Amino acid sequence: MNQLQSSRNDDISGKTYDPLDSAVQQNPYSYYTKLRRDEPVKWIESLKAFAVADYDNVDALLKNGKLYSSAQFWPELLGEYDPVPEVLPMISMDPPNHMHLRKIANKAFTPTKVAALQQRATDIANQLIDDLIAKYGKEGECDWVWDFTALFPVTVISDVLGVPTDRRAEFKVWVDDLLSAANRAAYGPERLAQIRKHSDELRAFFEEIYDQRSANLGDDIISTLIQAEVNGERLTRHEVLSMSVLLLIGGVETTTNLLGSTLVALHQHPDVYERVRADHSLIPALLEEVLRFNPPVQMIFRHTTEDTELGGVAIPKGSCVMPLLASANRDESKFANSEVFDIDRKIEVPLMSFGQGPHFCLGSFLSRMEARKALEVVFTRLEVLTPLSSEVHWLESYFARGPHELRVRYKAR
Ligand code: HEM
């Protein structure tokens, strides 16, 4: 059995890493390898930022929230399309203020709380497979991204937030549009008006939910946030709205992409597909390797608060720094045969896929649990689930990675 198969590493000699180049977005990994080898800390002219490609420097900078601030992350991502511009969300706060909010949020996402959601995640996955069969029949073709991977996490997070799941298709559109605001400089007035409209709709939706919950508290997260206290003070309306938007954005696209990239990996490694189908206890190891090898969040952003130096490169105060999480995960000094997809590997250092340091992903337990439950249901209910093509059209993004669509043939048992 050969479960060790190399990834495709294109010949890119003579080419430079430009995250805005769509060819780079489709296959960034050869560029990351070259950066780690030749220039692990490199100025990227197109983004006016320093890219950081090696594990140790990525790890060190993410753990130093004072020097590498998150404050500009959200404003840069969403610009004027932030649905709650009155306050910065937790992901864009620096220590020590960040920790107050994070402590409250942590309470809602402990492993115990997440474990309590397992049955619900299984039920949601089963319901989606029922819907698929009702729509296209017991066997047929569909777009796995639209018909399953996009709907599953948005339904789970709606449940966690206690908001009606019948509006999940709208949520998905709102979140997609908000995230696309990162490319706003390249859009014309029509597209920008659409993003504005969806940002306003999302805000109006959470305003309504806030009013409902304040009048009638439940045991959902929004009610928890409304009642929570930091240093004896309640969160303001804007703080609760902002956290709700952050959870929706954080919880939707990322897990969708993890599930989509997992099916791509299984298609590329049929021996692994066979083993995991036969033995569902391998699913967690499969997911860890997909998270390492092809993570949904390729990079994040920080800004320096002082002049500093990283990897021998001088970085002036106020510079944008991009830790390339996906590159750190393939650092050959930390992961043996790092360019090989191997679900049996022993992972000895933390993956960078969920970040590191104070902003380490709040939803890491939730997304791993969700993805595991989804795959258990899918492998149990569908005896065939095969992409129609080996060509993958990845999202046109330099920070989010997952298949844009994935036409598959399926057959239910
Ligand atoms: C495979 C799925 C996921 C990936 C790859 C992922 C990735 C990340 C990364 C890289 C960060 C760090 C950002 C930074 O340091 O600036 C982060 C933070 C965060 N994630 Fe996730 N995420 C995933 C799923 C989720 C889910 C399901 C939720 C929702 C419940 C979520 C909510 C958050 C929040 C709220 C933060 C900010 C934490 C803070 O600022 O303290 N994520 N995530």
Image (cartoon, rainbow, N blue to C red):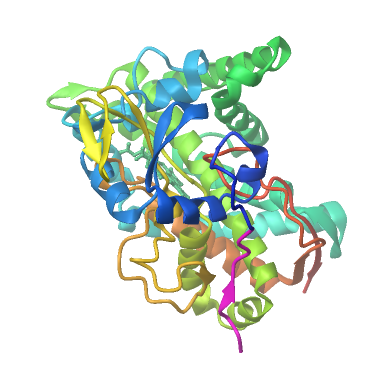
Which of the two residues, 121 or 348, is positioned nearer the viewer here? 348
Stretch in magenta: 1-10
Q: Quadrant of the N terminus?
A: bottom right
Relative to 151, residue 187 above or below: above
Determine if the magenta segment contains residue 187.
Answer: no
Where is residue 346 drawn, in percent x and y? 37, 76
Q: Is residue 121 left or right of residue 392?
A: left
Where is residue 44 drawn, in percent x and y? 46, 33
Determine if the magenta segment contains residue 3.
Answer: yes
Q: Quadrant of the C terminus?
A: bottom right
Where is residue 152 drawn, in percent x and y? 61, 50
Relative to 217, residue 16 above or below: below
Residue 127, by quadrant, is bottom right
Relative to 394, residue 232 above or below: above
What residue is rendered at 53% in x and 57% in y?
A: 294
- Visible residue check, residue 116: no
Where is residue 388 drawn, in percent x and y? 82, 62
From this viewpoint, which residue is outermost toward the bottom?
A: 1
